[in-house]
Image: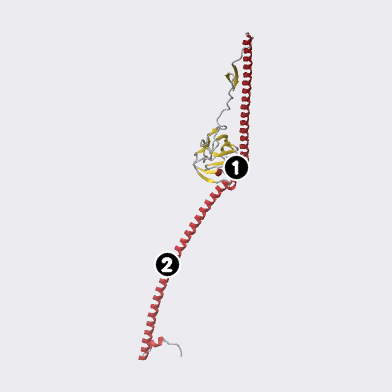
Amino acid sequence: EGSFDSAQMLKSSNFDQAEQRKALADTVSGNHTDVIDQLKGAKAKIADLQAETDAARAEADARRKDEQDQLDGLQTSRNDQAKVKAEWDKRLNGLQDDDAKLGSADAELAALIQQKQAEQAAAAEAARQAQAAAQAQAQAQAQAQAQAQSRAQATQAQSQSQGTNAPGSSAAANSTTTAGGKTTTTSGGTAPAPSSGGGKPVTGGRMIWPINGTVSQEFGHNGHPGIDIFAPMGTPIYAALGGTVIYAQFNGGGYGNLVVVDHGNGLATAYAHQSQILVSVGQSVGQGQQLGLEGSTGYSTGPHLHFEVRVNGSVTNPRNYLP
């Protein structure tokens, strides 16, 4: 029935009113204490929540930092991988360019080898014919000398049987011929044929490895016309088989300092990218004889020996000839 007036209760003079005032005061005091306790509890909870929030925020910041560090590391790794890939792509492109340039020089080298082999064959044939002609000439001279000596002996025998000596009838027991620019005295025999000069190169047997190294590229890969053998700069290069040097100079087609050895029967070997050549054209070399020093001349991405085996000018897999 209307609101309770606490002020009126406090002003009341009768006992009931006093009791009511006390009860109200107790109620208010108790409520105040409860409110304070609740407020303290709420503040404590807020403090706990704040601490939990701060801890959660700190943990989140730490995780965020770890994730960012991982992302940064991943990005660094990706950048490093990109650099490595770019470097490998560069090297691969260099190798492919090297192969392409060597491939373009293949026909030139094949023609060169065929030409040199043809020249050697022609020179050998010319020497054979010259030797045969010299032998024929020597035989003809010997035959003429023998016939002259026989006639002289017959004339002398006839004169002796008649007891008279015919003027000019004595036999030419000795005659002089010239062979190879030297004067040789014969006595009715055959004059020795002039020497063709030079020893025959060793052509038999299986090839040896031309350098002590590691094969870095095989024959036929991307049209590669030989095998590449990696070794430190200046490693000695040896003849895989005995033969005759038919090319020993810088090659502008990509091979750099190049040596080509002809082994006869259309077989030849090529040794490219040398830093120094130690043989010359026309020189006979034995198997295992040093030809030069390994290098990186011409179209080369680094020190190595480019080794080729050619049959009648055409490339073939060197592995078929190596141990």
Q: Residue at x 48, y 57 (%)?
A: 73
Residue 309 or residue 196, whichever sits in front: 196
Q: Mark 2 to mark 1: distance in Å?
A: 75 Å
Q: Position of residue 255 (x, y in %)?
A: 57, 40
Residue 178 shows up from this direction: yes
Give the residue number, with chain letter if any, for mark 2: 55
Are the residues at dot 2 and dot 1 in contact (C-beta closer than 8 Å)?
no
Left or right: 169 in relation to 11? right
Q: Position of residue 112 (x, y in %)?
A: 62, 37
Give the residue number, with chain letter if any, for mark 1: 315
Q: Position of residue 51 (x, y in %)?
A: 41, 69
Left or right: 211 in relation to 114? left
Give amino acid for label 1.
Val
Instruction: Name the quadrant containing residue 160.
Output: top right
Element under disc 2 = helix
Left or right: 3 in relation to 94? left
Q: Position of residue 301 (x, y in %)?
A: 54, 44
Residue 229 or residue 200, whichever sits in front: 200
